[in-house]
Image (tube, grey):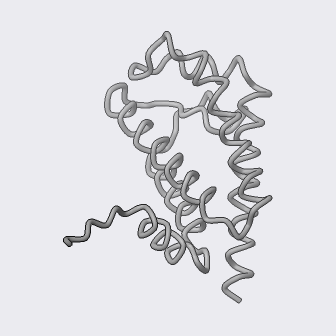
Amino acid sequence: MRHVFSTAAAFLVAAFMIFAGISKLVFYEEFEAVLKDWLILPQWGLPMIIIGVPFLEIMLGLWLVSSRSDWRPRVFLIALLCVFTVTVLIENSYSGNVSCGCLGQAMDTPTNIGLLVLRNMGLCLALVFHPSLFTKLGRYAQSKRIRIHAD
């Protein structure tokens, strides 16, 4: 049963990320206009962010769907969601009502920060429920440790 929930959660999160990335590409001008209003983003980096973020979301969503048993896309997506959430929170603290540019045509409306945080926390929790995520992360961390033996 847990495996079914994990697979369903992965597909839902992947679908959300792919939809978010495609909507940013389809409504490129709106996404660009939203991010140009942000105070914390450097203007010289906007072209990379405007193109890179949607492709990153789409690629991570496709990676999650294509490798359901792999823990790495889940970790990358959790990190990406945390970075997005913290960035929107910082921008909101500077400018007040901020539009996050998250989903297509709804980008011109101010973002309800509480709902954004809850949504991203829910997506992160859905990604955490992988049957062997913590086991594989633990094994990976142990394999990278350098052991020094005293002779």
The total number of labels drawn is 0
- For this rendering, which residue is in front, 30 or 49? 49
In the displayed structure image, the side of residue 35 where residue 61 appears, left or right: right
Is 31 above or below relative to 88?
above
Q: Residue furthest left?
A: 150
| Image coordinates for residue 126, horizontal then vertical, percent | 59, 68
| Image coordinates for residue 125, horizontal then vertical, percent | 53, 67
The quarter of the image holding the N terminus is bottom right
Q: Residue furthest bottom?
A: 1
The quarter of the image holding the C terminus is bottom left
Quarter of image, res 64: bottom right
In the displayed structure image, the side of residue 112 where residue 20 appears, left or right: right
Residue drawn at x 67%, y 35% as measured from the top left: 106
Is 106 above or below relative to 49?
below
Residue drawn at x 49%, y 74% as measured from the top left: 134
Quarter of image, res 141: bottom left
Is 28 above or below relative to 104?
above
| Image coordinates for residue 138, horizontal then vertical, percent | 45, 72
| Image coordinates for residue 122, horizontal then vertical, percent | 54, 63
- For this rendering, which residue is in front, 66 or 141? 141
